[in-house]
Image (tube, grey):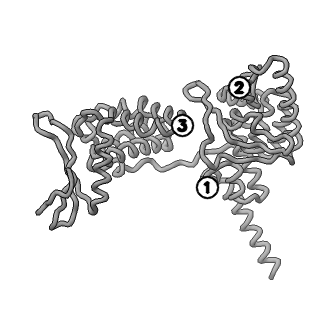
Amino acid sequence: MARKTVSPNIAFDTERKRYYVTFHYGTGPDGRRARSVRSFSTYEQAQLVLEEFMRTRPLRGNDLPWDMTVGRWLDYWLENTIRPFRAVSTCYGYQKIIDNHLAPALGSLRLQALTAVHLQQYMTQKLSEGLSPNTIRKHHTLISTALRLAVRQNMLSRNVAECVDPPRKELAEHFYYSPEQVSQLFRLLEGHPLEPAVKLAGYLGMRRSEICGLKWDHVDLEAGVLYICEARTAVGGQAVDKGPKSPSSQRHMAIGGMTDLWDLLRQLHQRHLRERLLHGPDYNPQGFVLNHSGKPYAPDYISNRFSTLIREAGLPKLTLHGLRHSFASIANSQRVSLYSICKALGHSNTTITSQIYTHLFDETHLDVVDLVGQAIVHAS
């Protein structure tokens, strides 16, 4: 091999026609300087990887590849590449997976000693502990993403998570009501404090976080339009205000054809104005549509209270999110297009809508086949 230095830490092999980058880590356990070498097909690739290595090296401190443990790498990955850019709720979920599962089982292993066998045994163990296949798939995605960064930053030569097969994804079972059952539920909750939340979920398919985050600034009562642009969710038992789940979650919903919901919101707004006059501007200062004595409802409280009401009324099992599924079911039964249902629900694409509601669209498929058959018979 004939290598010629073309820039600091980058050499070109004139025989193999490849660029070799040398990554310096400091002094190893034996007192010798530690380094690794990787090759690239172009100078631009080599330069980009070297620049990223030099930029992130201070974040890793003096950790050498063979000294870094899985636990410490997961902490580094979460703190430096996830937490600054992701929602608080997302970071909380990742932290719980690491603290409760990955760190106790794999955290003490050296990063470079982690094998596909370790990960496969980990997933088998978690299945035996009762975790669902879908939950374990989330664990696999998390550690695979973290290890991918380790490869890019030259702490690993390959991502062993890519050699592991996670459990097959299971379709979630969704409970939903028919139009008659939703109507019965609406009548049952007339005048109840949860009536607005239930009707917003049933009529519009809104998420719990969107209902709890709805403010009067986002409600145009004259035009009969709601603007969904904020969310309020629970993280570790604490309510957190944040932006929508995704850009597609920002949408507007017309309520002009839902007289009872429109009238209900007018009544709530009048009450809000009276309370502000009575108690002053410090009463519900952010203007949450759903509140109790001027304080916004905790998301978990609404869900728990709704489940209790369903149980006490002797109605079929349903969660508040189940009303969102009911909305999709009813829209589907009315031959609303998949694209329109996707937009109303705030999904980023129709694939997500189709995957979640496969069972609903399968039923429509049967109806379509029957209609096509009838058309052919009548034409003969």
What residue is at 51 percent from the left and 39 percent from the top? 86
Q: Earlier in the sequence, mark 1 or mark 3?
A: 3
Q: Amino acid at mark 2?
A: Pro
Q: Percent position (x, y) of residue 218?
A: 75, 39
What residue is at 88 percent from the left and 31 percent from the top? 267
Q: Quarter of the image containing the N terminus?
A: bottom left
- Which residue is most to the front? 7
User: Element at badge 1?
Assistant: loop
Disc 3 target residue: 87
Q: Amino acid at mark 3?
A: Ala
- Which residue is most to the top? 279
- Visible in this render: residue 266? yes
Q: Percent position (x, y) of residue 144?
A: 39, 46
What residue is at 86 percent from the left and 42 percent from the top? 222
Q: Earlier in the sequence, mark 1 or mark 2?
A: 2
- Visible in this render: residue 311? no
User: Element at badge 2?
Assistant: strand
Question: Nearer the observer, disc 1 or disc 3?
Answer: 3
In-front residue for pair 33/295 = 33
Disc 1 target residue: 349
Q: Which of the numbered marks, if any, corresponds to residue 296?
A: 2
Q: Quarter of the image containing the C terminus?
A: bottom right
